[in-house]
């Protein structure tokens, strides 16, 4: 009986030793709003704006010299006969008269590029396991196809050597539940604040059901959040 009580004291002492000074991070939410905006082509209306009126100078308003007619110019000429080459051409048909289509304002204006943003696939609230925890785990798909895990307004009771896992088990209550399979993402950046974790290119969100905060030093679960 005394041996069992002593072992329990050691275990509780190890869990208590897990507490360390809190560390806070605040990473911004990643976006792709820096996409270049398309240039707007000139519209028909802007092309038809009146130009500045042209002013008449004194030189331009002076009367020109009258042209005098000479005797040679006033002599009647002989009748002009039409040759075969001067015969009227064939009448124009409808096929030869093509209407000219002016561009409309709508066809000349290119719409501005709309920046793409990450899309949230799933999310879940953190619950502590023998430790205090709160905040949200959020799974996002980026416009380039990559995926990212974000811990938003996150807090977990501070501890040493903590890591972020994604686990396959439907429910996580004890360390043995990780035997169903898990993926280690990174060492936890901080016990408090907003933080981002990139996921592997071949990550399949359908295979993982929970985000886990794990204390490696003492082999204990700190917090869990469902992401399905």
Image (spheres, grey):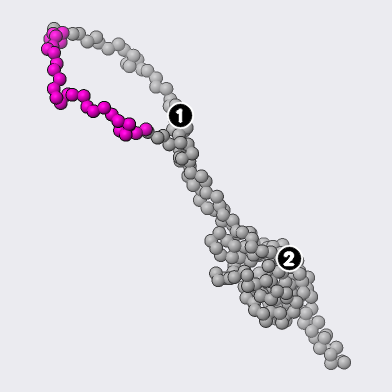
Q: How many marks?
A: 2
| Position of residue 168 in the picture relative to residue 86 (left or right) | right
Q: Residues within 10 Å of mark 2 (few under 14, many from 20)?
A: some
The image position of residue 32, as x and y in percent, is: 56, 56
SS at circle 1: loop
Residue 97 falls in which quadrant of the image?
A: top left
In space, the residues marked 2 and 1 are separated at their CA atoms by: 60 Å
Is 35 placed above or below 10 here?
Answer: above
Mark linked to residue 49: 1
Q: Residues within 10 Å of mark 1 (few under 14, many from 20)?
A: few
Extent of the magenta region: 72-99
Is 45 placed above or below 26 here?
Answer: above
Q: For the C terminus, give its image quadrant.
A: bottom right
**Residue 206 or 94: which is nearer the viewer?**
94
The image position of residue 92, as x and y in percent, is: 28, 29
**Residue 100 or 27: which is nearer the viewer?**
100
**Residue 180 or 13: which is nearer the viewer?**
180
In magenta stretch: residue 74: yes
Label 2, on which residue? 125
Is 33 placed above or below 41 here?
Answer: below
The image position of residue 200, as x and y in percent, is: 57, 70
Would you say residue 22 is visible in this rendering?
no
């Amino acid at each position: 009986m005394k041996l069992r009580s002593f072992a329990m004291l050691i275990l509780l002492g190890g869990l208590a030793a897990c507490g360390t000074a809190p560390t806070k991070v605040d990473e911004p939410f990643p976006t792709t709003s820096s996409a270049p905006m398309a240039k707007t082509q000139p519209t028909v209306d802007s092309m038809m704006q009146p130009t500045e009126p042209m002013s008449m100078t004194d030189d331009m308003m002076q009367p020109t010299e009258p042209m005098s007619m000479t005797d040679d110019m006033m002599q009647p000429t002989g009748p002009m006969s039409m040759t075969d080459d001067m015969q009227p051409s064939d009448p124009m048909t409808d096929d030869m008269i093509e209407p000219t289509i002016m561009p409309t304002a709508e066809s000349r204006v290119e719409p501005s590029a709309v920046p793409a943003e990450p899309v949230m696939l799933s999310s879940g609230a953190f619950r502590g396991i023998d430790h205090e925890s709160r905040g949200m785990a959020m799974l996002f798909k980026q416009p380039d196809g990559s995926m990212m895990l974000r811990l938003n307004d996150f807090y977990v009771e501070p501890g040493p050597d903590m890591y972020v896992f994604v686990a396959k088990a439907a429910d996580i209550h004890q360390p043995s539940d990780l035997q169903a399979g898990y993926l280690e993402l990174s060492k936890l950046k901080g016990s408090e604040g907003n933080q981002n974790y990139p996921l592997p290119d071949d990550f399949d969100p359908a295979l993982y059901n929970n985000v886990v905060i794990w204390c490696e030093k003492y082999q204990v679960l700190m917090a869990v959040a469902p992401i399905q």
